[in-house]
Amino acid sequence: MRIKDRIKPHILATPPSGIRKYFDLINEMKDAISLGIGEPDFETPWIIREEGIYSLEKGKTFYSSNAGFIELRREIAAYMARKYDLHYDPAEEILVTVGGSEAIDIALRTFAGPGDEVIIPEPSFVAYKGCTMFCGATPVPLELKAEHQFRIQPEQLEQCITDRTTVIIIAYPNNPTGAIMEYEDYAKIVEVLKDKDIVVISDELYAELNYKGKHVSIAQFPEMKDKTIVINGFSKAFAMTGWRIGFACAHPDAMEQMKKIHQYAVMCSPTTAQFAAIEALRNGEPEVRRMVDEYDKRRRIMYDGFNKIGLACFEPFGAFYCFPCIRSTGLSSDEFCERLLIEEKVLTVPGNAFGACGEGFIRATYATSIENIREALTRIARFVERVRK
Amino acid sequence: MQQEILEILRTNSRISNEELAVMLGADVESVKAVIKDMEEKGIIVGYKTLIDWEKTNQNVVTAFIEVRVTPQRGKGFDKVAERIYQYPQVKACSLISGGFDLFVVVEGKTMKEVALFVAEKLATIDSVLSTSTHFVLKNYKDNGVIFDRNGRDEREAVVL
């Protein structure tokens, strides 16, 4: 037997992420600037790192309860109430996960299976489609449009729903577009969803990175709360990507089942990260503010820069991405990114890596220093001018 | 806007007015006006560069000096402080609480030069009672900036 003959067709059918190949190229380059990595460039704030270190020094190296330390879940409950007016019972409705990624996976496994359809607004974070396919379910793309600032339109949503739809994934502030949805936007899609038997998986990892007012969650709508799984975490808000810690909040009936997958698959989240996360929620707020303010300044520089270069960009109010349109250059997204990398040593990610409708766009992150952003914009301007000649 | 401009300038005073305007979502003219106003009011008193002299081939020796003085009638500590801060070698001078009165930062090319300055100039001022000199051996962090920070981007390629 060859081992590869035994691999399941639905695993083989799942494409690897399209982002990878560019990273391999950039690793060999000197003076390259990466606008490709979707990860904060800040180190985890020291007060948070220090708590992790203390916990290790004190020998706190054991498992926590499967759902996570109750102390942490209480802090999460308080945080969700304080920041987003979402109220969950720490004992029954909150699960500490291995990053937001695990939460996405177990939520999908709980609610999607063979024959089911999962609506994924695209362009989107690459894991939704993959995880959906691992469940044997069918991803149904909902094509977001730049003219709608990449917000979900109720008519589009109606068109995607069939009687096989079991889940819709909603992810704002959005990776890769930087789009947000405001209260009125949600109100319109809640009208569509409220009477349907569809579970919402709301990935709100970038909730803190909202540069236009307060973050809105679809779970704030009373008619949606019980059928929404809210996913949030520490990676983006507190610059804790490597700690692998996030959480899910849901109705106890959903949580009970999700917890089973979690406990059999990963037991519990890393405890060092859990201790650090408690400190993050208790005292990390000023550090979050500091980072968000810094991102906001970089955001303005990048958004302004792309528009000056003539790469039309809608104003991104969330996350740390700009998603400019590059059609005016006559290049495809892939060509643009590859040539930009080879000719000017600037790494961006082609929009179509996030779904077919991302073609004609590129993703550039401003999670890098202002000096880098400035230099990258100079190089992009030079490149675009050359291409247009 | 004043506060926001100060927050940015205190970490990077080289930034242009145009960039400041973009970062703050304001127009260049009003940014210019606010800065000019702050300069005139003495809120912004200078623009300096933070240098790690260790990495240059110039010798710069810094000493922190605690100075005890007798305050003068009617003038308090201001008069003696003024005598001290006039020396170009004195880079900073503050009135402090605690066991000493003035905290003085002195810079020179060699330890001997600094020590002689203290012995011959500072200590001999009439109202100076005593001095205690601490030479800086290594700077770890200054003005909020960690000196020997590895600036490499250590983020690895990850699918996201």
Image (cartoon, grey):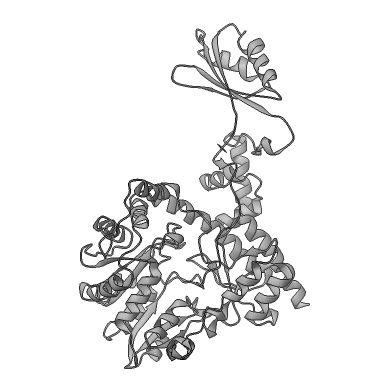
Residue A350 as seen in the image, left or right of residue A7:
right
Q: Position of residue A355 (x, y in %)?
A: 52, 82
When the figure is inspected, residue B148 is found, relative to residue B67, above or below; the finding is below
Closer to us: B147 or B1: B147
Left or right of A25: which side holds A291?
A: left
User: Farthest residue in the front direction?
Assistant: A1
Does the image show residue A102?
yes
Left of A324 or right of it: where is B98?
Answer: left
Q: Position of residue A89 (x, y in %)?
A: 21, 64
The answer to whether residue A58 is above or below residue A319 is: above
Is residue A18 placed above or below A232 in the rendered structure?
below
Residue depicted at 55% across the width and 56% down the height: A297
Q: Quadrant of the C terminus of chain A?
A: bottom right
Residue drawn at (67%, 14%), measured in percent from left and top? B116
The total number of labels drawn is 0
Outermost residue to the right: A389
Above or below for A12 versus A174 = below
- Nearest to the observer: residue A58 or residue B29: A58
Residue found at x 43% / y 54%: A288
Residue B27, image quadrant? bottom right
The quarter holding residue A170 reads bottom left
Residue at 65 percent of width and 54 percent of height: B18
Residue A243 percent coordinates (x, y) = 42, 59
Q: Is residue A13 visible?
A: no
Q: Position of residue B34 (x, y in %)?
A: 59, 45
Residue B153 appears left or right of A383: left
